[in-house]
Amino acid sequence: GAGVSQSPSNKVTEKGKDVELRCDPISGHTALYWYRQRLGQGLEFLIYFQGNSAPDKSGLPSDRFSAERTGESVSTLTIQRTQQEDSAVYLCASSISGTGGYEQYFGPGTRLTVT
Amino acid sequence: AQSVTQLDSQVPVFEEAPVELRCNYSSSVSVYLFWYVQYPNQGLQLLLKYLSGSTLVESINGFEAEFNKSQTSFHLRKPSVHISDTAEYFCAVTGGTSYGKLTFGQGTILTVHP
Protein backbone atom coordinates (compact mmCIF):
# COMPACT_ATOMS: atom_id res chain seq x y z
CA GLY A 1 0.00 0.00 0.00
CA ALA A 2 0.95 3.65 -0.20
CA GLY A 3 3.34 4.95 2.39
CA VAL A 4 3.65 8.41 3.89
CA SER A 5 4.12 11.04 1.22
CA GLN A 6 5.47 14.56 1.56
CA SER A 7 5.58 17.52 -0.76
CA PRO A 8 7.51 19.28 -2.02
CA SER A 9 10.61 17.09 -1.88
CA ASN A 10 12.82 20.16 -2.07
CA LYS A 11 12.09 23.80 -1.32
CA VAL A 12 14.41 26.76 -1.66
CA THR A 13 13.12 30.02 -0.25
CA GLU A 14 14.42 33.45 0.60
CA LYS A 15 14.85 34.54 4.17
CA GLY A 16 11.67 36.16 5.45
CA LYS A 17 9.28 34.25 3.19
CA ASP A 18 6.60 31.86 4.45
CA VAL A 19 6.60 28.17 3.45
CA GLU A 20 4.08 25.36 3.68
CA LEU A 21 5.08 21.72 3.83
CA ARG A 22 2.54 18.98 3.26
CA CYS A 23 2.25 15.46 4.64
CA ASP A 24 -0.15 12.70 3.58
CA PRO A 25 -0.12 9.93 6.19
CA ILE A 26 -0.95 6.28 5.68
CA SER A 27 -4.71 5.82 5.54
CA GLY A 28 -6.16 4.75 8.88
CA HIS A 29 -3.25 6.03 10.94
CA THR A 30 -4.58 8.17 13.77
CA ALA A 31 -1.22 9.56 14.89
CA LEU A 32 0.90 11.98 12.87
CA TYR A 33 4.26 13.50 13.77
CA TRP A 34 6.58 16.15 12.42
CA TYR A 35 10.33 16.04 13.03
CA ARG A 36 13.22 17.99 11.60
CA GLN A 37 16.81 17.00 10.98
CA ARG A 38 19.41 19.72 10.73
CA LEU A 39 22.73 18.91 9.14
CA GLY A 40 24.84 16.65 11.34
CA GLN A 41 22.18 16.36 14.01
CA GLY A 42 19.61 13.79 15.03
CA LEU A 43 15.90 14.06 14.47
CA GLU A 44 14.18 16.70 16.57
CA PHE A 45 10.50 16.33 17.50
CA LEU A 46 8.27 19.25 16.49
CA ILE A 47 4.58 18.38 16.89
CA TYR A 48 2.29 15.36 17.34
CA PHE A 49 -1.38 14.85 16.42
CA GLN A 50 -3.40 11.99 17.89
CA GLY A 51 -6.95 11.61 16.64
CA ASN A 52 -9.19 14.43 17.84
CA SER A 53 -7.03 15.28 20.86
CA ALA A 54 -5.29 18.61 21.16
CA PRO A 55 -1.90 18.38 19.43
CA ASP A 56 1.32 18.21 21.42
CA LYS A 57 3.15 21.32 20.24
CA SER A 58 5.94 21.11 22.80
CA GLY A 59 8.68 20.71 20.19
CA LEU A 60 7.89 23.74 18.04
CA PRO A 61 10.99 25.98 18.27
CA SER A 62 9.20 29.33 17.95
CA ASP A 63 5.83 30.91 17.24
CA ARG A 64 6.85 31.15 13.59
CA PHE A 65 6.11 27.43 13.35
CA SER A 66 2.57 26.07 13.23
CA ALA A 67 0.86 22.93 11.97
CA GLU A 68 -2.63 21.78 11.22
CA ARG A 69 -4.21 18.45 10.51
CA THR A 70 -7.51 17.86 8.77
CA GLY A 71 -9.27 15.06 10.65
CA GLU A 72 -7.08 12.01 10.38
CA SER A 73 -5.65 12.89 7.00
CA VAL A 74 -3.34 15.49 5.53
CA SER A 75 -1.21 17.78 7.68
CA THR A 76 0.48 21.07 6.82
CA LEU A 77 3.50 22.51 8.60
CA THR A 78 3.85 26.25 8.10
CA ILE A 79 6.96 28.27 8.81
CA GLN A 80 6.49 32.03 8.73
CA ARG A 81 9.26 34.57 8.12
CA THR A 82 11.82 31.84 7.48
CA GLN A 83 15.33 32.19 8.87
CA GLN A 84 18.53 30.50 7.73
CA GLU A 85 18.54 28.30 10.83
CA ASP A 86 15.26 26.80 9.61
CA SER A 87 17.19 25.03 6.84
CA ALA A 88 16.75 21.31 7.49
CA VAL A 89 15.03 18.16 6.30
CA TYR A 90 11.47 18.09 7.64
CA LEU A 91 10.16 14.58 8.18
CA CYS A 92 6.59 13.48 8.69
CA ALA A 93 5.63 10.13 10.22
CA SER A 94 2.38 8.36 10.99
CA SER A 95 1.39 5.38 13.14
CA ILE A 96 -1.73 3.39 13.89
CA SER A 97 -1.82 4.95 17.35
CA GLY A 98 0.36 7.27 19.35
CA THR A 99 0.46 4.95 22.35
CA GLY A 100 1.72 1.43 22.85
CA GLY A 101 4.99 1.63 21.00
CA TYR A 102 3.52 1.30 17.52
CA GLU A 103 5.95 1.72 14.65
CA GLN A 104 6.17 5.15 13.11
CA TYR A 105 6.33 5.12 9.32
CA PHE A 106 8.36 7.98 7.91
CA GLY A 107 7.95 9.89 4.70
CA PRO A 108 10.88 10.81 2.42
CA GLY A 109 11.11 14.31 3.86
CA THR A 110 11.14 17.85 2.51
CA ARG A 111 14.57 19.46 2.23
CA LEU A 112 14.16 23.15 3.05
CA THR A 113 16.92 25.58 2.17
CA VAL A 114 16.61 29.20 3.29
CA THR A 115 18.91 31.57 1.42
CA ALA B 1 12.69 14.81 30.01
CA GLN B 2 14.26 12.02 28.03
CA SER B 3 17.53 11.97 26.12
CA VAL B 4 19.48 9.54 23.96
CA THR B 5 23.23 9.42 23.47
CA GLN B 6 24.84 7.53 20.63
CA LEU B 7 28.45 7.35 21.60
CA ASP B 8 29.94 6.93 18.12
CA SER B 9 29.15 9.25 15.24
CA GLN B 10 30.94 7.01 12.72
CA VAL B 11 31.87 3.33 12.80
CA PRO B 12 33.96 1.89 9.95
CA VAL B 13 34.30 -1.89 9.78
CA PHE B 14 35.34 -4.52 7.29
CA GLU B 15 32.84 -6.94 5.77
CA GLU B 16 32.15 -10.04 7.90
CA ALA B 17 33.49 -8.36 11.04
CA PRO B 18 31.29 -7.96 14.14
CA VAL B 19 29.93 -4.54 15.04
CA GLU B 20 28.36 -2.83 18.05
CA LEU B 21 26.63 0.53 17.86
CA ARG B 22 26.22 2.01 21.31
CA CYS B 23 23.14 3.74 22.67
CA ASN B 24 22.46 5.05 26.17
CA TYR B 25 19.27 6.75 27.26
CA SER B 26 18.08 8.83 30.16
CA SER B 27 14.53 8.60 31.46
CA SER B 28 12.77 8.62 34.81
CA VAL B 29 9.95 6.39 33.60
CA SER B 30 9.51 3.09 31.79
CA VAL B 31 10.47 3.37 28.16
CA TYR B 32 10.06 1.83 24.78
CA LEU B 33 13.29 1.69 22.77
CA PHE B 34 13.83 1.63 19.02
CA TRP B 35 16.54 1.41 16.42
CA TYR B 36 15.76 3.03 13.06
CA VAL B 37 17.94 2.75 9.96
CA GLN B 38 18.36 5.06 7.00
CA TYR B 39 20.00 3.48 3.97
CA PRO B 40 21.62 5.80 1.41
CA ASN B 41 18.99 7.78 -0.51
CA GLN B 42 16.13 6.08 1.36
CA GLY B 43 13.73 7.07 4.11
CA LEU B 44 13.95 6.18 7.77
CA GLN B 45 12.65 2.70 8.64
CA LEU B 46 12.26 0.66 11.82
CA LEU B 47 14.96 -1.95 12.42
CA LEU B 48 13.85 -3.36 15.78
CA LYS B 49 12.15 -2.34 19.02
CA TYR B 50 11.89 -3.23 22.70
CA LEU B 51 8.51 -2.81 24.38
CA SER B 52 8.50 -5.40 27.17
CA GLY B 53 9.31 -9.02 27.88
CA SER B 54 12.57 -10.53 26.68
CA THR B 55 15.36 -7.98 26.87
CA LEU B 56 16.98 -9.32 23.70
CA VAL B 57 15.25 -8.35 20.47
CA GLU B 58 16.22 -9.27 16.92
CA SER B 59 15.67 -7.96 13.42
CA ILE B 60 15.06 -10.03 10.31
CA ASN B 61 18.47 -9.18 8.86
CA GLY B 62 20.61 -10.42 11.74
CA PHE B 63 20.86 -7.38 14.02
CA GLU B 64 20.05 -7.70 17.71
CA ALA B 65 19.81 -5.29 20.62
CA GLU B 66 19.67 -5.89 24.35
CA PHE B 67 17.78 -3.69 26.78
CA ASN B 68 19.85 -3.20 29.92
CA LYS B 69 17.83 -1.29 32.49
CA SER B 70 20.59 -1.01 35.09
CA GLN B 71 23.00 0.49 32.56
CA THR B 72 20.24 2.36 30.68
CA SER B 73 21.61 1.02 27.41
CA PHE B 74 20.22 -0.46 24.22
CA HIS B 75 23.28 -1.34 22.14
CA LEU B 76 22.87 -2.72 18.62
CA ARG B 77 25.02 -5.64 17.52
CA LYS B 78 25.60 -7.84 14.51
CA PRO B 79 28.10 -10.73 14.51
CA SER B 80 29.00 -10.42 10.83
CA VAL B 81 28.20 -7.35 8.72
CA HIS B 82 27.63 -7.06 4.98
CA ILE B 83 28.33 -4.24 2.56
CA SER B 84 24.55 -3.74 2.38
CA ASP B 85 24.46 -2.82 6.09
CA THR B 86 26.13 0.50 5.27
CA ALA B 87 23.65 3.09 6.55
CA GLU B 88 22.95 5.59 9.32
CA TYR B 89 21.47 4.10 12.46
CA PHE B 90 19.37 6.03 14.97
CA CYS B 91 18.46 4.99 18.50
CA ALA B 92 15.21 6.41 19.86
CA VAL B 93 13.13 6.34 23.05
CA THR B 94 9.56 7.10 24.03
CA GLY B 95 7.72 6.75 27.32
CA GLY B 96 5.85 8.32 30.21
CA THR B 97 4.06 11.52 29.30
CA SER B 98 6.10 11.51 26.10
CA TYR B 99 4.42 8.38 24.75
CA GLY B 100 4.15 8.68 21.02
CA LYS B 101 6.81 11.20 20.20
CA LEU B 102 10.29 9.80 19.76
CA THR B 103 13.46 11.29 21.17
CA PHE B 104 16.33 10.39 18.85
CA GLY B 105 20.06 10.12 19.25
CA GLN B 106 22.31 11.93 16.82
CA GLY B 107 22.87 8.86 14.67
CA THR B 108 25.80 6.55 13.91
CA ILE B 109 27.05 6.16 10.36
CA LEU B 110 28.08 2.55 9.81
CA THR B 111 30.37 2.07 6.81
CA VAL B 112 31.20 -1.49 5.81
CA HIS B 113 34.33 -1.84 3.68
CA PRO B 114 35.09 -4.83 1.44
Image (cartoon, helix red, strand yellow):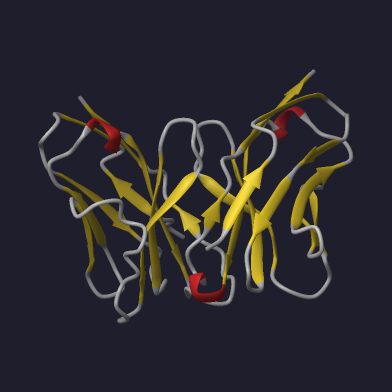
Instruction: Residue at 68% x, 30% y: name it.
Output: B86
- The answer to whether residue A105 is left or right of residue B20 is left
Judge from the rendering whether residue B68 lies leftward or rightward of residue B25; answer left or right.
right
Residue A7 position, x and y percent, is: 27, 45
Q: Where, by quadrant of the figure, is residue B39 drawn?
A: top right
Horizontally, residue A44 falls left or right of residue A76, namely right
Residue B105 drawn above or below residue B18: below
User: Can you say whether B96 is above or below B36 in the image?
Assistant: below
Q: Nearer the viewer, residue B52 or B79?
A: B52
- The location of residue B29, given as percent across then percent down, is 63, 73
Q: Residue furthest top?
A: B114
Total tally of numbered discs in the picture: 0
Residue in view at x 46 percent, y 60 percent: A1
Q: Residue furthest bottom?
A: A52
Q: Quadrant of the C terminus of chain A?
A: top left
Q: Is residue B112 visible?
A: yes
| Res B52 quadrant in image | bottom right
Q: Position of residue B33 (x, y in %)?
A: 66, 61
Instruction: Tell me which residue sits at (78%, 65%) in the image.
Output: B69
Compare residues A91 and B97 and report the one nearer the observer. B97
In the image, residue B1 above or below residue B4:
below
Q: Is residue A35 left or right of residue B75?
A: left
Residue appearing at x 26%, y 41% in the figure: A8
In percent of width and height, residue A106 lies at 46, 53
> Can the viewer see residue B60 in this picture?
no
